[in-house]
Image (cartoon, rainbow, N blue to C red):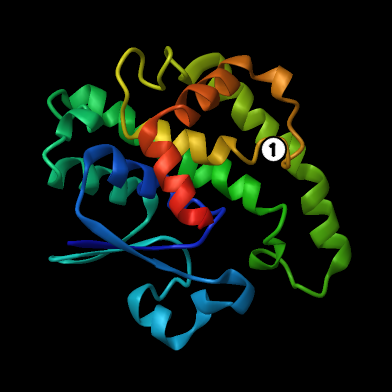
């Protein structure tokens, strides 16, 4: 049995969707950001980073969405969702998800978590980062739209572990100040993902 520690409206939704997609046996534990439970001693024992998500497995604890997505696909008997039968294609999966993790998600976080990078009392620096978010995040989506989104799904004709990850981030596109008309393929992908049963079920569970 897997246990997913999640918070609503965070990147944990990507792993939550995949758990539903593969039909995994899992439970969830909700962490309340408003009460800063992610910084509680109890949660820091699970994930010392104080971030979402964390996945408890029978082998130990996993953090970081790219790693968790690969693990869920492989351990559930669905390595095809990570294209693991093809070393080059699997590397492409890793490259895309690494870009989401190290670039797009980081730029998005500058909108509401500027204190990670500058003094929380430096209002001018915080405001400058927030003003730059539409530019930096917009550039990320421009690259995805132009060069990285290969078909109806991220990797082309096959649904993979990249798709719930991009979907989760793309839900925040407008609030990050990016005009959806700028990235029609990303928006179409978001619509297609929103129609999948696994996506609907994961979102409903997190909103309950």
Give above or below for 135 relative to 201. above
Q: Position of residue 102 (x, y in %)?
A: 49, 46
- 193 vs 59, left or right, is right
Task: Name the one closer to the observer, 127 or 164.
Answer: 164
**Residue 70 visible:** yes
Name the residue: 25% across, 43% down. Answer: 70
Please, what secondary structure does the residue beneath circle 1 have?
Answer: helix
Vertical comparison of 111 with 160: above or below: below
195 on left or right of 23: right
Which residue is painted at 49% across and 84% down in the image?
40
- Residue that lies at the very extreme toward the bottom in this rendered image: 41
Q: Nearer the viewer, residue 119 or 113?
A: 113
Q: Residue at x 16, y 42 (%)?
A: 74
Q: Which residue does the numbered mark 1 point to in the structure image? A: 136
Residue 96 appears in the figure: no
* Res 54 → quadrant: bottom left
Q: Residue at x 29, y 46 (%)?
A: 19
Relative to residue 156, is residue 22 depicted above or below?
A: below
The answer to which of 38 and 110 lies nearer the viewer is 38
Q: How crowded is mark 1: few (under 14 residues within 10 Å), some or many (20 or more)?
A: many
Residue 155, x across and y down, in percent = 36, 20
All told, the count of numbered labels is 1
Q: Nearer the viewer, residue 81 or 98?
A: 81
Residue 112 on image: x %, y %: 71, 58
**Residue 206, above or below 74:** below
Q: Quadrant of the N terminus?
A: bottom left
104 relative to 101 in the view: left or right: right
Residue 41, quarter of the rendered image: bottom left
Outermost residue, right side: 124
């Amino acid at each position: 049995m897997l246990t997913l520690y999640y918070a609503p409206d965070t990147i944990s939704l990507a792993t939550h969707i995949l758990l539903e997609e593969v039909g995994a046996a899992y439970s969830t534990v909700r962490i309340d950001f408003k009460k800063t439970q992610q910084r509680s001693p109890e949660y820091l024992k699970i994930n010392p980073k104080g971030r979402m998500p964390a996945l408890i497995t029978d082998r130990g604890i996993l953090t970081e969405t790219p790693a968790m997505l690969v693990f869920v696909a492989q351990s559930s008997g669905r390595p095809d969702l990570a294209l693991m039968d093809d070393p080059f294609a699997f590397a492409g999966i890793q490259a895309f998800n690494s870009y989401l993790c190290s670039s797009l998600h980081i730029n998005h976080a500058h909108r509401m978590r500027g204190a990670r990078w500058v003094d929380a009392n430096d209002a001018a620096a915080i405001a400058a980062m927030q003003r730059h978010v539409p530019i930096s995040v917009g550039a990320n989506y421009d690259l995805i739209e132009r060069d990285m989104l290969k078909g109806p799904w991220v990797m082309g004709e096959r649904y993979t572990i990249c798709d719930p990850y991009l979907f989760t981030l793309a839900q925040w596109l407008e609030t990050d100040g990016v005009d959806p008309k700028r990235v029609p393929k990303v928006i179409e992908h978001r619509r297609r993902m929103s129609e999948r049963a696994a996506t609907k079920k994961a979102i409903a569970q997190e909103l309950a």
